[in-house]
Amino acid sequence: MILEVKNGSFSYGSREVLKDVSFHLEEQKIMTILGPNGVGKTTLLKCIMGFLQWNSGGTMISGKSLTEYSDKELWRKISYVPQAKQSVFSYGVLEMVVMGLDKENGFFYSPKKEHFERADEMLKELGIGRLADRYCNELSGGELQMVMLARAMVSGPELLILDEPMNGLDKKGVSQMREIFLEYKKAGNSILMATHNPQDVEILCDHVYEMDDGVIEKIY
């Protein structure tokens, strides 16, 4: 079991957002949390990752509690892709992808030639090598989404956790993203993603859960 959430609950003050959430994700599977905007999907992902602390319950990664991992150990195993927002910083695309290797080398490491080569190869693998010399604040929303995915994948994690990964993508981009996910799964890895769009899960997911009012229910 790559991921398990046990009886997870979370509140913002007196407002209960997540209510006794439990589910698990096996190795080499793709799972979607489906629900409209505002029902708590992003909050759920943040609790799973440890960015927000569960009020009760917890997250298990490969049979170990999230709290048993050091940051370095955890980020070698999983990567998170938030909703892409237009960058206000003038980071180069290649530089942004190299940042995905911080978890291997420490936050203050100085990237070497091989790190940039690895990042460039990751961009090419995702079909966006043409963006290597661009700046993030010049990209469209869909292009930035793909760059953020490259940053998450460059370190070779076993589990990707993604928030609305298809946002900003045109039809071709959505098709390309699906192919990337299926290849990633074929290589032995797992994906958990949250989306409001039912079309995002077509011919892609092994398991789908529907979320509403802080509760999730398995559809299949």
Image: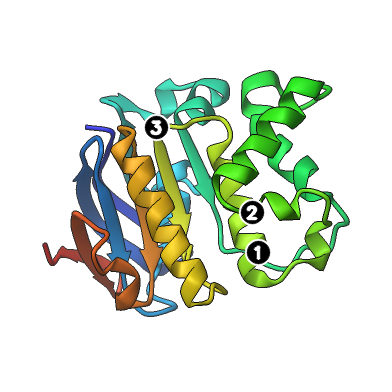
Q: Position of residue 99 (x, y in %)?
A: 72, 37
- Residue 217's spot in the image, x, y percent? 16, 65
Viewer-side residue, 56 vs 170: 170
Which label's residue is closer to the chain start, 2 or 1? Answer: 2
Which residue lies at the image location 33% right of the left edge and 38% below the top edge?
59
Find numbered disc 1 in the image and state the secondary structure of the residue it sits on. helix
Left or right: 92 in relation to 204:
right
Residue 2 location, x and y as percent?
Answer: 28, 33
Q: Which element carries disc 3, helix, strand or loop? A: loop
- Quarter placement of the N terminus: top left
Q: Are marks 3 and 1 in contact (CB under 8 Å)?
A: no
Query: Does residue 109 show up?
Result: no
Instruction: Quickly name the residue at label 2.
Output: 128
Which kind of residue does numbered mark 3 sit on? Glu
How much space separates mark 2 and mark 3, taking CA atoms? 22 Å
- The circle drawn on residue 143 is 1
The residue wearing badge 3 is 158
> Marks 2 and 1, Cα distance to the nearest angstrom?
8 Å
Residue 98: quarter of image: top right
Q: Which mark, by number, is residue 106?
A: none
Q: Residues within 10 Å of mark 3 (few under 14, many from 20)?
A: many
- For label 1, count other residues whose C-alpha is less than 10 Å away and answer few (under 14), some (14-19) or many (20+): some
Q: Gap in Å between the C-alphas at discs 3 and 1?
A: 24 Å
What colour scheme does the image use?
rainbow
Front one among 125 and 36: 125
